[in-house]
Image (spheres, grey):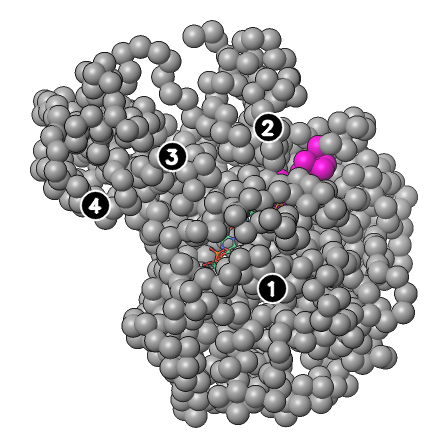
Amino acid sequence: MEATRTTCPYCGVGCGVLARPDGTVAGDPEHPANFGRLCSKGAALGETIDLPGRLLYPEVGGKRASWDAALDAVAEGFSRALRQGGPDSTALYVSGQLLTEDYYAANKFAKGFLGTANIDSNSRLCMASSVAAHRRAFGEDIVPAVYADLEQADLVTLVGSNLAWCHPVLHQRLMAAKAARPQMRIVVVDPRVTATCAGADLHLPLAPGSDVALFAAVLARCADAGFAAPGMEDALAVARGIDPGLTGLAPDAIATFCDWFARTEKSVTLWSQGVNQSGAGTDKANAIINCHILTERIGKPGASPFSITGQPNAMGGREVGALANTLAAHLDWSVPAEVAALRDAWGAPNLAMGPGLKAVDLFRALGAGTIGALWVMATNPAVSLPDGDGVRAALKRAPFLVVSDCTRESDTVDAAHVRLPALGWGEKDGTVTNSERVISRQRAFLPRGGEARPDWWAVAQVAKRLGFGEAFAWDGPAAIFREHAALTALVPESRRAFDISGLAEISDADYAAMPPTRWPVASRGAPGERLAPAARFIPTPYRGLAQPGAPLTLLTGRLRDQWHMMTRTGPLPRLMAQAPEPELTLHPDDAAGIADGALVRLGNAQGSAVLRARLDAGQRRGSCFAPMHWTARFCVGARVNAAVLPVVDPISGQPELKGAAVAITRYVADWQGFVLAGAALDLPAAWMARSPMPGGVWRHEVAGEGDATAAFAALRAALPETTGHWAVLEDAVLGLHRAVLLREARVIAVVCLARASDEVPRRDWLAALMAEEGITLAERRCLLAGEAAEGPPPSPTLCACHGVTVGRIEAAILDGAEDVAAVGAATKAGTGCGACRPEIAAILARAPVPA
Ligand SMILES: Nc1nc2c(c(=O)[nH]1)N[C@H]1C(S)=C(S)[C@@H](COP(=O)(O)OP(=O)(O)OC[C@H]3O[C@@H](n4cnc5c(=O)[nH]c(N)nc54)[C@H](O)[C@@H]3O)O[C@H]1N2
Ligand SMILES: Nc1nc2c(c(=O)[nH]1)N[C@H]1C(S)=C(S)[C@@H](COP(=O)(O)OP(=O)(O)OC[C@H]3O[C@@H](n4cnc5c(=O)[nH]c(N)nc54)[C@H](O)[C@@H]3O)O[C@H]1N2
Ligand code: SF4
Ligand SMILES: [Mo]
C-alpha cells in the first residue's frame, strides 16, 4: 500500500506524515519540520480515522437533507439577512484548522461579495496579539525565524510556552540540540512549573500578566550594557519607568536572566499563549521584540524573536487575511491603492471598506440580535470563547446559524439550523503553513466520508446561489491556491515580505506534488529562509491583568495528549489516560483546607465550573491552572470559559483567556464514585466526567447530593444492560455502595459510591476485568473489594506512545536504569514522541521506593 505524504492536522509545528489508507502513520523523514518524528497525538492519527460521531450528511432543521436543499437554505438565510439588515448583519467565524484554500474562499466570500468584514477567526483567541505586535514593529505580520534557530542559539527563552506538551516535536529538537551542546541555556518564563521546565537552566515563575515588566528590565539592562539603536529613546524611557518588582521574581533571578540575555548574541525568544492571551498581549510581544531590535538580533542564525503558532494553519489564515481587521495577501486597508487593486482583482465592487467585528464583539452582536446570519466553520465557539454561557445563549438566539464541521459531536454543531459535513483529515486536499512559514500539502489518502465535501466547495456553491458564481468558479484547490498566490504580487510598489507570486502559475500536477516550501517565494529568486525586516521600537507601558480581583488567578491551557475540545483525541483511551478527569491545580498553601482529590467549584460572578483539585507546590501561589479541553460531552459542568470574562487586549482584541479572577470553594457532594460500562452514558448525577478506557470500557466519575442509597439505585437503573446477576455490597453506615453486574464469567458493569473519592476502589483493575472474555474464580472473589488479592496494584500509563506504565518505569529504575535514556532502552518509554521524558526524569529524581 503506497504511503501518501501529508501533514499532521494538529499543532503549528506542521510535521510531515506518511499515511496509508489502512490507518498506519509514520513521521515523514524528509519533512523539514520533523525529520521523521511524531508526538503522541500525531502518532495516534491512524486511530482517529474511524471515530464515531462524524457529521456525514447535510442537515436542515435537524433533519437529513440533500446538499442542494442545504445550500439553498444557506443562500436563503444569508439573502434574508442581507435584505433585512444589510451586509453587516451577516458574518462568518472561521478557524486556523481550515486549509488555506478553504480559508481564502471564506474570506473572499465575506469581504468581497457579502460586502462585510465581519469575518473573524479563532486565531483571534490565539495569534491576534502577535499579529498586531508584528505589524507595529515590522509594518507587516512577519515571523523572522526558522526552527533551526532554536538549535543554533546559545540562549533560548520560552515565554508563556509549554513547548514540551504543545509543540512536542520542536521541543525534542531543542532538547537534542542541548544534549549536543550542553552550554546552550534554556530559560522558561511561566508562572507555574511545567513539563518544559524539566529541560531548562532557569525557570522564572513570574506573576501572571507581568511579562512586560520582565522584558522592560531586559531592555534597560541591554541599554546599560552599551547597546543602542536609533529610535529607542521612548521605548527605553517607558521601560526604565517600570518596576521589575511587579514580576514578583527574586531580584537576583531577574538580574541573571538580564545578564544572560545581554551577553548572548545568539539568543532566541520564543513565545506563545502565556503572552498572546492577555489583556496586554500585544505590548508583551512588543516588549520582547524591542529587546531583539536593540540587540540587533532579528532574523539571524540563532538570533531572533519567534512567535510560534498553535493551530496547523494559523499562519495560512494570516496569509489569506481572514481576520476582521486584515485583508487578503497582507494587503492593507489603509493603503487605498491596495484596496482598489484587490477590488479589481476580485471583481468585487462591494468590497468591505474597513475592519469588521472581532470575535468577542461578533458574538456580543449575535447576542444583541444585530447579526441575522452567521456561518461557523471548523471551530467550536460554544466552548472556546470566553463568557462561555453568554456565547451559548447567543448561539441559541441566532436567527440563522450555519455550522460546517466534520464532527456531529460539538456543542456549536448542536445549535446550528443548517449543518454542513466537512471533509476530515485524510480526506481533504490543500495546503497549510506552519510556524516557520513552510507551506505543506495536506493530501487525501482516504475516500470521502459519507457526503462530506470541501469547505471551499460549499462556500462557492452558496456564492453561486447568491449570484456571485463567476468569482468562485474554481475546479479544485490548485486553482484557488494560484489565485491566492497571484494576489501576493498584486501591487508591485507595495513590497511585502509575504510574496509567493513564484507559485502563482503552478500547474495542477506541480501543486499535487508540491514539496514543503518556505515563503517568500518571489517570482524571481530562491525560496526564503530567515527574514530580517526593518523594525520599530514600540513603547510598552505596564498594564497588569485586566481581570484583577480576589482571590485566585485562573490560568488555563493545554494537556499533553488532548487537542482542544477533544473531538478527536478524547475518544482514544491511550490519549485520555494522562488525565481522565478535569483537574484544577492549586498550590497547597492556597488550598484552604481543600484536600488533594476533592471536587471544587471555581467561579466568579459570571460563571463557574467543577473540577477535581490537585495540590502541587509547582503552581505559583495565588494562581491555579485548569485545562481548557473539557466540554459538556466529556464532563458536565467543567467548562472553564464559563468563568473567564470577555475582556480583550485593546490593540489586538484578543481575549484574556489566562487571568480570570476566581474563588475556589469545596463542592459538597454527599456521594461520589464511578460507573464502568460498555458505552458512554447519560447518568443521573449532578457532576459527571466520562472517559474511554482500553477494551471499550467507559469510565464515568460521578458525584451528587442527597441520599446515597437512592443515588446508587438510580445509577444502576440507568444502565442499559440489565440481564445478568448483580453482586452487591452495601454498608449504609460506612457509606459504601458497590455493585458488579456479571453475565456468566463476564463483568458487564460496575457501580461504586462512597462518601469521598479515596474510599472507592481503583478503576484500572475492574476496568481491565471488564475487557476480558471471562474472569477467574479468584478474581471474582475479590470483585467487591475492588482489587486483586495478590500481585501489584495496577499502575497508570505514562508513555502514551508505547503504553508504558509508571510501574514499569519504576521497575526499570530499580533494575539499575540511571537516566532517561536507560529507562527508554529498558522499557521504550520516552522513545516515541518524547513528551513524557520530563515526567520520567521526575520519577528518576524521586527515586522510587522498592515495593
Ligand atoms: N497537546 C496540545 N498541543 C497543542 C494544542 C492542544 O490543544 N493540545 N493546541 C495548539 C494551539 S491552538 C496552541 S495556541 C498552542 C498553545 O501552546 P502554549 O502557549 O504552549 O500552551 P498553553 O498551555 O495554552 O499556555 C502556555 C503557558 O502559558 C502560561 N501562562 C499563563 N499566564 C502567563 C503569563 O502571564 N505569562 C507567562 N509568561 N506565561 C503564562 C501557562 O501557565 C502555560 O503553561 O498549542 C498547540 N498545541
Ligand atoms: N480558556 C481557554 N480558552 C481557549 C484557549 C485557552 O488557552 N484557554 N485557547 C484558545 C485557542 S489558542 C484556540 S486555537 C481555540 C481552539 O478552540 P476551537 O477552535 O473551538 O477548537 P476545536 O475543538 O479544535 O474546534 C475545531 C473544530 O473544527 C472541526 N474541523 C477540523 N477540521 C475541519 C475542516 O477542515 N473543516 C471544518 N468545517 N471543520 C473542521 C473539528 O471537528 C472541530 O470541531 O481555543 C481558545 N480557547
Ligand atoms: S508536534 Fe505532534 S501535534 Fe504537532 S504537528 Fe508534530 S506530530 Fe502533529
Ligand atoms: Mo491556538
Q: Where is residue 730 in the image (x, y as percent from the top left)?
A: 11, 25
Query: Of tags 2 and 1, which is closer to the observer?
Result: 1
At x 39%, y 72%, the residue is: 58
| Residue 219 visible in the current orientation | no
Task: Give the quarter of the figure containing the C terminus.
Answer: top left
Residue, disc 1: 429
Question: Which amino acid lies under the numbered mark 4 shown in the image of this protein?
Answer: Leu
Cβ atoms under marks 4 and 2 closer than 8 Å: no
Residue with the mark numbered 2: 830
Q: Residue at 77%, 33% (x, y): give it.
A: 177
* Circle number at residue 683: 4
Q: Locate residue 574: give its quadrant.
A: top left
Q: Nearer the viewer, residue 585 or 417?
A: 417
Name the secondary structure under disc 4: loop
Q: Position of residue 614 (x, y in %)?
A: 41, 31
Q: What stretch is highlighted in magenta?
A: 166-175
Q: Earlier in the sequence, mark 4 or mark 1?
A: 1
Query: Is the C-beta separation of discs 2 and 3 under 8 Å?
Result: no
* Nearer to me, 592 or 185: 185
Label 2 or label 1, whichever comes before in sequence order: 1
Q: Nearer the viewer, residue 121 or 422?
A: 422
* Label 3 beta carbon less than 8 Å to ligand 1: no
* Tag of residue 694: 3
Kindly report the distance in space between the C-alpha atoms of the residues bearing marks 2 and 3.
21 Å
Nearest to viewer (mark 4 / mark 3): 3
Category of crowding for the residue at label 1, using alpha-carbon neighbours closer than 10 angstroms: few (below 14), some (14–19), many (at least 20): many
